[in-house]
Image (cartoon, grey):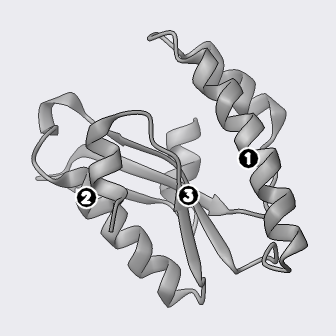
């Protein structure tokens, strides 16, 4: 259900290879507050024990939102957030995460966003987003 909504929204991107789903970048406007049910459902699907990362991300997110609001930057259409990038393991290490990051930045610019932000939990995504 989450993937279907992301495929259909204006900010997120999906990637297919020969008509096979290979990856997705779930993006949203930073002023958009995630539905608590969405976060709860995401945590339930946490097979790898990353719950503590959600807690850290939440704390950083709250602090960062206050800083952006204080600077007058927390306005709709100003900051796009890459909430999650996922690549099917069959297609990993082929540059698809970097491709989705690059296309997200292009999409953001095309929609008038000035900034794109992302949090990463591994070296591969950190490398893909450091540009």
Q: Earlier in the sequence, mark 3 or mark 2?
A: 3
Q: Residue 87's spot in the image, x, y percent? A: 28, 40
Looking at the image, which is closer to me, 52 or 21? 52
Q: CA distance from mark 3 to mark 2?
A: 15 Å
Task: State the quadrant of the N terminus.
Answer: top right
| Residue 85 visible to an observer of this rendering | yes
Q: Are marks 3 and 1 in contact (CB under 8 Å)?
A: no
**Disc 3 or disc 2, which is closer to the eye?**
2
Q: Residue 7's spot in the image, x, y percent? A: 48, 54
Q: CA distance from mark 3 to mark 1?
A: 15 Å
Q: CA distance from mark 2 to mark 1?
A: 23 Å
Label 3 Cα crowd, 10 Å radius (few <14 / some 14-19 / many 20+): many
Which residue in the structure is indicated by mark 3? 27
User: Relative to residue 113, is residue 1 depicted above or below?
Assistant: above
**Residue 40 placement, left or right of 42:** right
Which residue in the structure is indicated by mark 1? 61
Q: Earlier in the sequence, mark 2 or mark 1?
A: 1
| Residue 15 visible to an observer of this rendering | no
* Label disc, if present, on residue 102 of the rendered structure: none
Label 1 Cα crowd, 10 Å radius (few <14 / some 14-19 / many 20+): some
**Disc 3 or disc 1, which is closer to the eye?**
1
Q: Residue 16's spot in the image, x, y percent? A: 23, 53
Which residue in the structure is indicated by mark 2? 98
Instruction: State how many labels appear.
Output: 3
**Residue 40 placement, left or right of 109:** right
Residue lying at 70% horizontally and 25% vertically, measured from the top left: 55
User: Relative to residue 2, is residue 45 depicted above or below?
Assistant: above
């Amino acid at each position: 259900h989450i993937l279907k909504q992301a495929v259909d929204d204006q900010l997120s991107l999906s990637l297919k290879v020969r008509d096979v789903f290979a990856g997705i970048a779930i993006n949203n406007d930073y002023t958009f507050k995630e539905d608590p049910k969405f976060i709860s459902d995401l945590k339930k699907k946490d097979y790898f024990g990353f719950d503590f990362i959600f807690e850290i991300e939440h704390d950083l997110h709250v602090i960062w939102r206050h800083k952006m609001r204080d600077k007058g930057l927390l306005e709709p259409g100003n900051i796009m957030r890459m909430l999650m990038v996922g690549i099917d393991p069959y297609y990993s290490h082929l540059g698809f995460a970097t491709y989705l990051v690059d296309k997200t930045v292009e999409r953001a610019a095309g929609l008038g966003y000035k900034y794109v932000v992302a949090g990463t939990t591994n070296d591969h995504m950190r490398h893909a987003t450091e540009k």
